[in-house]
Image (cartoon, helix red, strand yellow):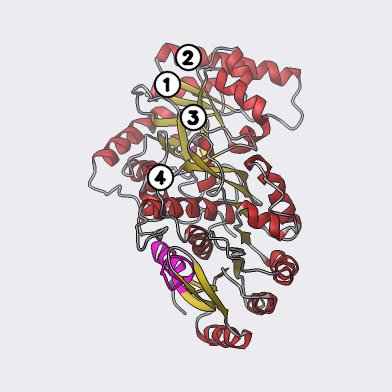
Amino acid sequence: MSAIPIVWSIAGTDSGGGAGLSADQRAADAFGVHLCPVVSAVTAQNSLAVTHIEPMPTALIDKQLRALAEDMPPRAIKTGLLGGAEQVRLVAQWVDRLRQAGPVDLVIDPVLAATTGTRFADPSTLAAYRDELLPRATVITPNRREALQLLGEPVDATDLAAGDLPALARRLRAAGAQAVCITGGDSSDVDGLTVDWLSSEHAEGWLALPRVPTAHHHGTGCTFASSVAAALSLGFVPADAAVLGKMATTHALRHAYAAGHGAGPVHAREGFANDPALLPWMSWGEARRFATPPPAAQQRPLDLYAIVDSAERVHQVLAAGVLTVQLRIKAPAEPNAAWQLRLSGEIGRSIAACRAAGAELFINDHWQLAQALGASGVHLGQEDLLALGETGRAALQASGLAIGVSSHSLWELCRARNLPPRYIACGPVWPTLTKAMPWRAQGLDNLSWWRHMAPAPVVAIGGILSANEVRQAAACGVDGACVVRGLGADPSHTVRELWQALRAGRTGAESSRPPTLPHASLAR
């Protein structure tokens, strides 16, 4: 079997080359996966209109799928235009059959009507979508009109605001879809941004990027759904696949062109994931707020970043020459007054020591106490930030504290953009025993990608146990390297070597060029 992931697209042809299987092929090429085009319908169309649709006989589609299954089984299937309820049921049967042999993702792009107004789906086809495909879908990518149709709601009489999309997505997930991304390219802007609502097991929120000012947008929905399918085939979870889909589709719109008198095709290309301007914002909740920080003043590099668990340890690393410190004291299951008093003392002594040394201190988790005691910075995990809610996050941002934030996946990187942070931690770079986590090691390739794409300085964290790991991380161009166990019992014996490794990595000959695509960081 090919080492390149295989994606089946069961969709219609477009004689104008804009949408359908033509757009799907361009998206697959942008991701470096192999697309098998399964023709479900032949359309006569150009850039102005669809003039005829000829659904393929179900038996002919079945023959195409049988031939592929014998030799080129898919890791993901994407559906586009399906010409009737019988075709929908055939796809459902094949998904079940293929899943008996192994995991197969199903991405549904419910092509129910053309932008020119031509309708593709009758009531029996819509019912088959609801009954057969939604319960089997890994991701479904409707626009809001298609979401309404799938739910059996009247479309012409309903003008949903974009803010109602979360409720629609919840209903689609209740109908069986594992993840839903309702695209908003056909709706009104939010401060010049196009916003899509993502709802999945791992993350929910608005994905936003600046609208591309072009009259050429033919094949946008096909490109997004095929990009999601390609990302799933590469091992990404649905939330990360949606991020990559958003990036690839916006990139494709940037490279759209005229090919007739109407809307021309979008063109997804390799390299889309190396443009920092294409990293979306992701909201922390249903409020559509997207941070655009002012240009930051030049700040010193974070360099060697020591993570310690006591004020005594803070004094030790400062004496050894460390100028960036995180005080990480985890709360017990049932914190009491005595523990709170001890915590206040530890934070207070650490603040005083770092001020005297001219060092930067970040307090892990306890941001309100840190603020009350006069700390300048805090570090928070994304679950803690989510738990704060809109009010708590607004209070944190208004506090003036410098915020460091953890990130392990693409959607977390996009959410971190919305703070904005002093720095973003990328990890675990190497496997770590410091704490249990579901994440795969990022490796140096993802670390280089994070450093290139992140909207704030990046620090490497996780599994940095020796000078060798510090040197390799620094060679990726990161702003700092976080060390916990690698500090040893006596930092005065280790810090000098770690500093030398940091400098050597930054001046070494190793390339820090990021990969074309990151790799998946969460096992599925």
Is residue 282 in view from this perspective? yes
> Alpha-carbon neighbours of circle 2 within 10 Å: few (<14), some, or many (≥20)?
some
| Circle number at residue 318 | 1
Kind of residue at disc 4:
Pro
Decide: is 49 above or below 361: below
Marks 2 and 1, the one that precedes in the sequence: 1
Kindly identify which residue carries mark 3: 420
The magenta stretch is 14-35
Amino acid type of the residue tagged 1 in the rendering: Leu
**Picture disc at residue 353:** 2
- List x then y, in percent, for residue 387: 68, 33
Q: Residue 358's quadrant in the figure?
A: top left
Marks 1 and 4 sit apart, C-alpha to C-alpha, by: 52 Å
Which quarter of the rendering shows the C terminus?
Answer: bottom right
Q: Secondary structure at mark 2?
A: helix
The residue under label 4 is 213
Q: Can the viewer see residue 445 in this picture? A: no
Residue beneath the point at 55% across and 63% down: 114
Q: Is residue 49 above or below residue 325?
A: below
Q: Nearer the viewer, mark 1 or mark 3?
A: 3
- What's the amino acid at mark 2? Ala
For this view, does 99 lie left or right of residue 13?
right
Q: Mark 4 near mark 2, Cβ–Cβ under 8 Å?
A: no
Please tell me whether mark 4 sits on a helix, a strand or a loop: loop
Is 288 within the magenta?
no
Task: Identify the image quadrant of residue 368.
Answer: top right
